[in-house]
Image (cartoon, grey):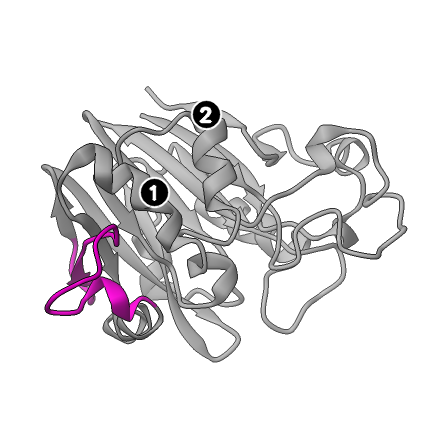
C-alpha cells in the first residue's frame, strides 16, 4: 500500500489569505498546505479520500489518471467542493465515478452537483454512482474498508480503515467502540489543528494521546492550521513514531 497526502491544511489552507504570521510567510514548502485529502494505492486500486477545493491541483501534482472510488468523510466544503474536478478522470475511465459516503452526505452531493444526476444530463458533465455507508464494512474491488464513526463537534462524520491504515480528519471525539476498530494499525493518519485546544478538532496533545493509546507502528498528523507552528519546530517535539504531515508526503506500508 502507498498512501499519499494530497493536502494537509485546514479549510483556509496555509498560507491563510491576508495573514502575515511566521508560518504563512515561511519559505519552507512543508509549511504550505492545500486543503486536506489523501490518495491510497493498494491491490491495484486507486482510492481518493475527500475532494476539496484544491483537488484539480492535487490530481495534477500526483499525476492521477484513474480513481476507483472516492471515500468522503463529510460534507463540509473543504472536503467536497472540488468533486467536479474529477471530470477528466471520468472521461479517461469512461465509467461512472464511485462515491461512498454517509446517506446525509450523499444528499448534499445530489443537491450541489444536481446536473450530474439529471435524466438527460448536459453533455460533458461527470457521472457519479453513489453508495451509502452505514456501520458495516464494505468492499471496493475486493479491498475491505471499515467505516470509523467520529464526531466533529456534534456532527457525525466518517474516518476509514483500509487494511492496516486508517485515515481520520476533522475529528474531535472517537468513542471507545470505534477505537477498537483502530487496533493493530501500521499507519494512522489523524487530524490535529494546532497546539491550543479547539472546540471541533483534536489539538496536537489530544491526537498524540490517541496515538499513544492505539500504538500504531507509525502515525502522521494532518488537517494542520498555521497556528500549529513551523513544520521544523513542531517535528522536533514529536515522538519517534509520529511525524507532521506535509503535502505530497508518501508512505509505503508493507
State the residue at coordinates (71%, 55%): 194
Residue 170 visible in image = no
Mark 1 nearby-residue class (10 Å; few <14, some 14–19, many ≥20): many
Instruction: Please give left or right for residue 206 compared with residue 115 in the image.
Output: right
Mark 2 nearby-residue class (10 Å; few <14, some 14–19, many ≥20): some
Percent position of residue 244, x then y: 63, 37
State the residue at coordinates (31%, 25%): 1
Secondary structure mostly taken by the magenta-highlighted segment of the chain:
loop
141 within the magenta span: no
Percent position of residue 186, x then y: 38, 32
State the residue at coordinates (44%, 54%): 82
Q: Which residues are magenta?
A: 113-137
Residue 3 in the image: above or below residue 50? above
Image quarter (top left, top right, bottom left or bottom right) of the C terminus: top left
Percent position of residue 24, x then y: 81, 45
Residue that mark 1 sits on: 48
Q: Which mark is residue 98?
A: none
Residue that mark 2 sits on: 251
126 vs 147, nearest the viewer: 126
Helix, strand, or loop for circle 2? strand
Q: Quadrant of residue 247?
A: top right
Q: Quadrant of residue 59?
A: top left
The Cα atoms of the two marked residues, 2 and 1, are separated by 15 Å
96 vs 240, nearest the viewer: 96
Instruction: Please give left or right for residue 140 compared with residue 150 in the image.
Output: left
Instruction: Please give left or right for residue 229 compared with residue 159 in the image.
Output: right
Q: Earlier in the sequence, mark 2 or mark 1?
A: 1
The mark closer to the camera, 2 or 1, is 1
Percent position of residue 69, x then y: 23, 45
Q: Quadrant of residue 89?
A: top left
Instruction: Please give left or right for residue 208 compared with residue 58 in the image.
Output: right
Amino acid at each position: 500500500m502507498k498512501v499519499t497526502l494530497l493536502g494537509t491544511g485546514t479549510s483556509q489552507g496555509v498560507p491563510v489569505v491576508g495573514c502575515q504570521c511566521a508560518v504563512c510567510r515561511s519559505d519552507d514548502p512543508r509549511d504550505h498546505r492545500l486543503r486536506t485529502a489523501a490518495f491510497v494505492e493498494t491491490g491495484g486500486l486507486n482510492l481518493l479520500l475527500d475532494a476539496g477545493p484544491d483537488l484539480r491541483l492535487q490530481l495534477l501534482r500526483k499525476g492521477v489518471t484513474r480513481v476507483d472510488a472516492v471515500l468522503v468523510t463529510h460534507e463540509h466544503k473543504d472536503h467536497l467542493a472540488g468533486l467536479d474536478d474529477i471530470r477528466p478522470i471520468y472521461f479517461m475511465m469512461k465509467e461512472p465515478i464511485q462515491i461512498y459516503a454517509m446517506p446525509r452526505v450523499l444528499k448534499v452531493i445530489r443537491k450541489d452537483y444536481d446536473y450530474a444526476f439529471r435524466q438527460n444530463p448536459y453533455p460533458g458533465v461527470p457521472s457519479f454512482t453513489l453508495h451509502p455507508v452505514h456501520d458495516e464494512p464494505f468492499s471496493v474491488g475486493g479491498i475491505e474498508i471499515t467505516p470509523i464513526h467520529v464526531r466533529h463537534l456534534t456532527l457525525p462524520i466518517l474516518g476509514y480503515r483500509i487494511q492496516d491504515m486508517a485515515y481520520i480528519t476533522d475529528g474531535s471525539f472517537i468513542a471507545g467502540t470505534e477505537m477498537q476498530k483502530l487496533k493493530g494499525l501500521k499507519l494512522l493518519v489523524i487530524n490535529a489543528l494546532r497546539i491550543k485546544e479547539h472546540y471541533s478538532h483534536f489539538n496536537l496533545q489530544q491526537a498524540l494521546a490517541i496515538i499513544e493509546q492505539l500504538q500504531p507502528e507509525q502515525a502522521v498528523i494532518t488537517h494542520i492550521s498555521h497556528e500549529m507552528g513551523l513544520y521544523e519546530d513542531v517535528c522536533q517535539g514529536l515522538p519517534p513514531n509520529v511525524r507532521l504531515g506535509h503535502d505530497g508526503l508518501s508512505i509505503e506500508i508493507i
